[in-house]
Image (cartoon, helix red, strand yellow):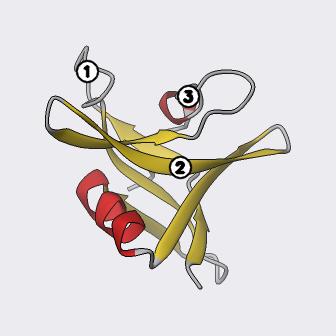
Amino acid sequence: MAKRARIRYANKTDRKNPHERITHVGGVNPDGKPWKRSIDQVVKDIESGEWEFYVEENGRRVGVVWATHNGHKYIKTTADDVQPDNVLPLLAECPG
């Protein structure tokens, strides 16, 4: 069974391409310690089936998946009844 982690933060660049804008994501472990991973590592974690990531906003939990655009792997939220990639860009910057 995959471990689950809530993504609460994202480091973003000033790039215009939305598929390359987020470089790292992070959250808080159950023990209160922060965690931070590169997008490449998150993609590997999802591909391996070891981890599942999600974003929760306003009581709504949305899964995070990886996708490819022009040969570049990136992460996005799964389609909900709003839009498929509407939450990750809105997250606060990762601390530290």
Q: Quadrant of residue 42?
A: bottom left
In front of the other: 31 or 87 = 87
Say what secondary structure mark 3 lies in. helix
In front of the other: 76 or 33 = 76
Residue at the far top in the pictured view: 16
Give the residue at mark 3.
90
Task: Determine the residue positioned at 24% across, 56% down.
Answer: 40
Q: In which quarter of the image is residue 2?
A: bottom right
Type of the residue with mark 2: Val
Q: Quadrant of the N terminus?
A: bottom right
Residue 27 rendering spot, x and y as whole percentages: 54, 61
Q: Quadrant of residue 72?
A: top left
Give the residue at mark 1.
14
Residue at the far left in the pictured view: 71
Q: Nearer the viewer, mark 3 or mark 2?
A: 2
Give the residue at mark 2.
64
Q: In this view, does 45 lie above or below 80?
A: below
Counting residues from the N terminus, which is met first, the one under dot 1 or under dot 2?
1
Counting residues from the N terminus, which is met first, the one under dot 3 or under dot 1?
1
Q: In this view, does 7 lie above or below 50?
A: above
Q: Nearer the viewer, mark 1 or mark 2?
A: 2
Q: Is residue 28 above or below residue 8?
A: below
Task: Determine the residue positioned at 38% across, 56% down.
Answer: 96
CA gap between label 3 and label 1 equals: 14 Å
Type of the residue with mark 3: Leu
CA gap between label 3 and label 2 equals: 14 Å
89 relative to 67 in the view: left or right: right
Task: Determine the residue positioned at 75% across, 26% down.
Answer: 81
**C-beta proximity under 8 Å, tags 3 and 2:** no
